[in-house]
Image (cartoon, coloured by chain):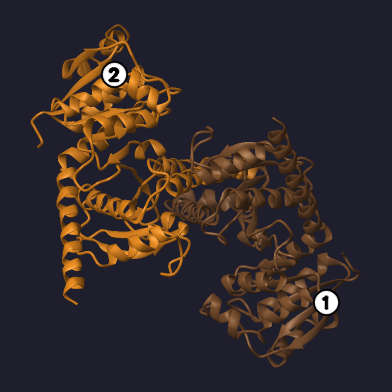
Chain colours: A orange, B brown
Amino acid sequence: MVTEPLVLSIDTMGGDNAPGMVIEGVDMAIDSLGDVEFLLFGDEVLLGPFLDKFPRVRAASNVRHTTDAVLDEDKVGQALRTRRESSMRKAINAVYDGEAAGIISAGNTGALMAMAKFVLKTLPGIDRPAIASCFPTERGLTVMLDLGANIDCDAENLVQFAVMGEAYARNVLGLEYPTVGILNVGVEGLKGNDSVKRAASILQNSDLPMQFIGFVEGTDIGAGTVDVVVTDGFTGNIALKTAEGTVNFFSAALKQAMTSSLRAKLGALLTRPAFAELKMRMDPRCYNGAMFLGLNGICIKSHGGTDAFGFAHAVQVAADLITNSINESIKEDYARISLSDEMEAAVVDAQ
Amino acid sequence: MVTEPLVLSIDTMGGDNAPGMVIEGVDMAIDSLGDVEFLLFGDEVLLGPFLDKFPRVRAASNVRHTTDAVLDEDKVGQALRTRRESSMRKAINAVYDGEAAGIISAGNTGALMAMAKFVLKTLPGIDRPAIASCFPTERGLTVMLDLGANIDCDAENLVQFAVMGEAYARNVLGLEYPTVGILNVGVEGLKGNDSVKRAASILQNSDLPMQFIGFVEGTDIGAGTVDVVVTDGFTGNIALKTAEGTVNFFSAALKQAMTSSLRAKLGALLTRPAFAELKMRMDPRCYNGAMFLGLNGICIKSHGGTDAFGFAHAVQVAADLITNSINESIKEDYARISLSDEMEAAVVDAQ
């Protein structure tokens, strides 16, 4: 699956500061990626000055000219129908055609998901792709999914998300036996809606290479109680953004406290290096790059408002998924759960 | 409605450190409550030493002896059937009988909600009570509901929650024209599930004394974008606990940063007073006291793990709801929305 060199397809037209931010981000990513090539989809006239500025990117890239781009305000259906010549669509096509191993875009999330699903299709056994992201917790890193691709999810969707999250935690985070929990309003088995209860019961009876610990609560996300938090896209999106808003509020309150008196200001001066480290630990750019898991190809969504540093991280996320063969692992795991279902059915029949 | 003196019914047997924590909390609450009397439901043998310790509470109270108590591990149905002589049930009955204007308990949340709903019933037009709580944001205070009473909510439930939250913000927070938003995965009208979309459309066409601004996202909770955040109990519970977990994580990371070097420790010493203020601003005890809105009587749930200071705040919340006639206001508002629906229907018929 992994070819040498690694080829990545880049939508250079997505994001608030595209294409400059994108090209600079690609340049930064080169440092950590080793042998890599880029297919840059976008307007070569606009790209020219930035490629002059970042000669390493020019040397490692193949520019595929197109002047059309998906706009942030494009509706999903409209983008799917009318943006066939867009940089986003063509960048996805390159993955489908086998020219690139993964695609990264900072453009319209809904359009990217719809196009990627339409072009790449889902992996066998996966009904719906999920948006997954990794973020810092008290214990280390936690991956959470779905973060907004699927508003309504049934038990089977949640089980598939668990399989995908576990495959990520094992293969990319390198955890031998990842812990997985389903987000709920309490840890007792009786709590929650039908989807989470049924999903928990299916996972309890599966023989997947993970430690399914049952339900977790909102507090467990920041605590890092489990390596993988499984939830529907409505709840996941709101939980993620609530955490983000809480960090913003806390940071603002902290800043206010640190400038509230001369004494506090002096203290703030002394704690500056320690705070810089804390800030880095919480820096959303270091966790940029939402993974569209469950697609028959690697597709990464960078935050539209990020800078080159953040985009470079999204490129790194794509490379990590590819080199760790995430999709092969999801397919293998999913085969196990299907087998386990069949076995269970056999047991039921035999009774 | 408000009688002089204010009479509050207290379940002294609920909470991790009951009844000591409860009696000490009542003592603290006396300072701010003025002319108040308490009906203390619980075991008079256990209460005795604490009433000796807090003579002001003894002087202001009427002890109603009972030895039975709802346990944390009691299932809701079981508590409802078998705990008719419990301190919790009898404390609720006192509100139904008109002996007290409100009841406060730090006991089992599910049992308290079920008993309160069974005994007090809901207000006219309200199908389901909601759990509401007030918390600090960048802009001030925000009230959010439902926080876990109703796992699945339809549009009508959400509209009722909006009415109740708005009544609280106007009457208790003293806002003339509160802003209200429905929690969703995006601010655009097309996003979200059917319940939030329909609820938004009903509220947009109502003539309630509030400023309905449409959808808000998770980040808006901490930002304080609106005074009232309306959501279903599943999402609300998870959002609240996610925010709590994020604050815990941030605090732990901050503490770690502040002790990471000698220089940082010195800075921490200097910033200590400013931090104490910040800590107070974030202190969950200052926001303790979840309101069960929509019941035909005031019922407040204190956190079970709180201390006397937190319990005193929950008592204060009950007093605030009573003296500001929250239920009269909800009834009036609800009448308006019904009228508005009828008018709308009349318009439709006329077309």
Q: Residue at x 17, y 19 (%)?
A: A60
Task: State the mark number for residue B99.
Answer: 1
Q: From where the camera sits, is residue A265 visible?
A: no
Q: Residue at x 30, y 8 (%)?
A: A49
Amino acid at dot 1: Glu
Chain identity of mark 1: B
Amino acid at dot 2: Arg
Chain identity of mark 2: A
Is A342 on the left-hand or right-hand side of B61?
Answer: left
User: What is the distance, in whole Å, between disc 2 and disc 1 at their CAs?
Assistant: 72 Å
Is A65 on the left-hand or right-hand side of B127?
Answer: left
Percent x, y for residue A7?
Answer: 15, 27
Looking at the image, which is closer to me, B115 or A226?
B115
Percent x, y for residue A21?
Answer: 35, 21
Is A9 on the left-hand or right-hand side of B261?
Answer: left
Task: State the mark number for residue A84.
Answer: 2
Question: Furthest residue to the front?
Answer: B350
B272 versus A78 height, above or below:
below
Question: Furthest residue to the bottom?
Answer: B45
A124 versus B293 height, above or below:
above
Percent x, y for residue B144?
Answer: 62, 51
Percent x, y for residue A265?
Answer: 60, 41
Q: Dot 2, how many residues are within 10 Å of its Cα: few (below 14), some (14-19), or many (20+)? A: some
Looking at the image, which is closer to me, B306 or B105?
B105
Looking at the image, which is closer to me, A134 or A279?
A134
Q: Residue at x 39, y 59 (%)?
A: A196
